[in-house]
């Protein structure tokens, strides 16, 4: 269980007061008209038909379509800030279609626990600034949100996901299958615990 009592976190993206809350429970239309320039996609949301890449096929015919992070929709180029002081754990380009594209995984410690955070769908130049092990402070700019052509083919947004288990690479399963859901919620806690009540 993630412990956050009395810990202060910095916003990962400077958001306006008004946000659109996306509902992908009935599918995803990349050409939909956005109500606002900024929006939020939900944690632990069942998203049928949204994830089409082969990487989302699970074992025994299952499909990974339950979202384990929070999506923050915003214009490409938007700054992504460190929510807490830490170090660069892993970074690289998950370049397959429907994947994260450029990705940074950070490592943090507070209240006696180690927490990792994946920042996906970044701009490619975001990766050139850092090396594994580099330290950063809370509120320091880590990256910028990527364009559609570099972020796996998605509309510009940040995928932000927490993990209580150390990632072996610059990747985490951003969506899990129904049979993995209960366990996934224990190791990938709700990002609103550090991002605040976005919805």
Image (cartoon, rainbow, N blue to C red):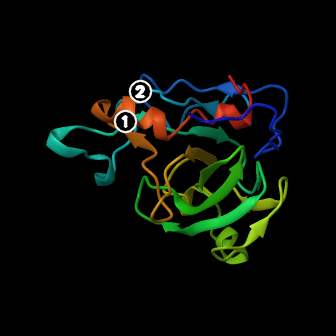
> Which callout, 2 or 1, points at the residue further toward the start of the chain?
2
| Residue 87 image position (x, y, % from top left) | 70, 65
Q: Nearer the viewer, residue 189 or 150?
A: 189
State the residue position of label 1: 65
| For residue 178, side relative to residue 32 (left or right) | left
Q: Nearer the viewer, residue 89 or 56?
A: 89
Tell me if residue 50 comes above or below residue 117 in the rendering: above
Quarter of the figure with the N terminus:
top right
Q: Cα distance, mark 2 to mark 1?
A: 6 Å
State the residue position of label 2: 46
Residue at image position (66%, 67%) is: 88
Residue at image position (27%, 38%) is: 63
Tell me if residue 153 comes above or below residue 185 in the rendering: below
| Residue 82 image position (x, y, % from top left) | 76, 54
Residue at image position (57%, 67%) is: 90
Decide: few, some or many residues near mark 1? Use Cα within 10 Å; few <14, some 14-19, many ≥20: many
| For residue 127, side relative to residue 179 (left or right) | right
Q: Residue furthest left?
A: 60
Tell me if residue 77 comes above or below residue 66 in the rendering: below
| For residue 13, side relative to residue 158 (left or right) | right
| Residue 119 image position (x, y, % from top left) | 62, 54
The answer to which quarter of the image holds residue 111 is: top right
Would you say residue 162 is visible in this rendering?
yes
Quarter of the figure with the C terminus:
top right
- Helix or strand or loop: what does disc 2 sit on? loop
Q: Nearer the viewer, residue 98 or 176?
A: 176
- Do the CB atoms of the residues marked 2 and 1 lie less than 8 Å apart? yes
Residue at image position (66%, 31%) is: 192
Would you say residue 67 is visible in this rendering?
no
């Amino acid at each position: 269980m993630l412990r956050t009592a009395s810990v202060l976190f910095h916003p990962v993206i400077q958001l306006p007061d008004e946000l659109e809350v996306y509902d992908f429970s009935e599918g995803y239309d990349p050409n939909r008209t956005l109500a606002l320039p900024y929006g939020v996609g939900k944690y632990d949301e069942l998203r049928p038909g949204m994830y089409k890449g082969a990487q989302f096929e699970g074992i025994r015919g299952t499909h990974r379509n339950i979202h384990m992070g929070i999506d923050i929709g915003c214009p490409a180029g938007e700054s992504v800030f460190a929510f807490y002081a830490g170090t660069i754990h892993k970074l690289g380009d998950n370049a397959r279609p429907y994947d994260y594209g450029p990705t940074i995984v950070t490592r943090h410690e507070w209240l006696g626990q180690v927490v990792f955070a994946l920042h996906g769908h970044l701009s490619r130049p975001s990766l050139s600034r850092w090396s594994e092990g580099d330290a950063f402070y809370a509120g320091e700019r880590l990256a910028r949100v990527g364009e559609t052509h570099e972020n796996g083919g998605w509309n510009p947004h940040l995928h932000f996901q927490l993990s209580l288990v150390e990632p072996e690479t610059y990747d985490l399963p951003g969506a899990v299958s129904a049979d993995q859901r209960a366990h996934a919620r224990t190791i990938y806690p709700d990002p609103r615990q550090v991002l605040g009540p976005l919805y």
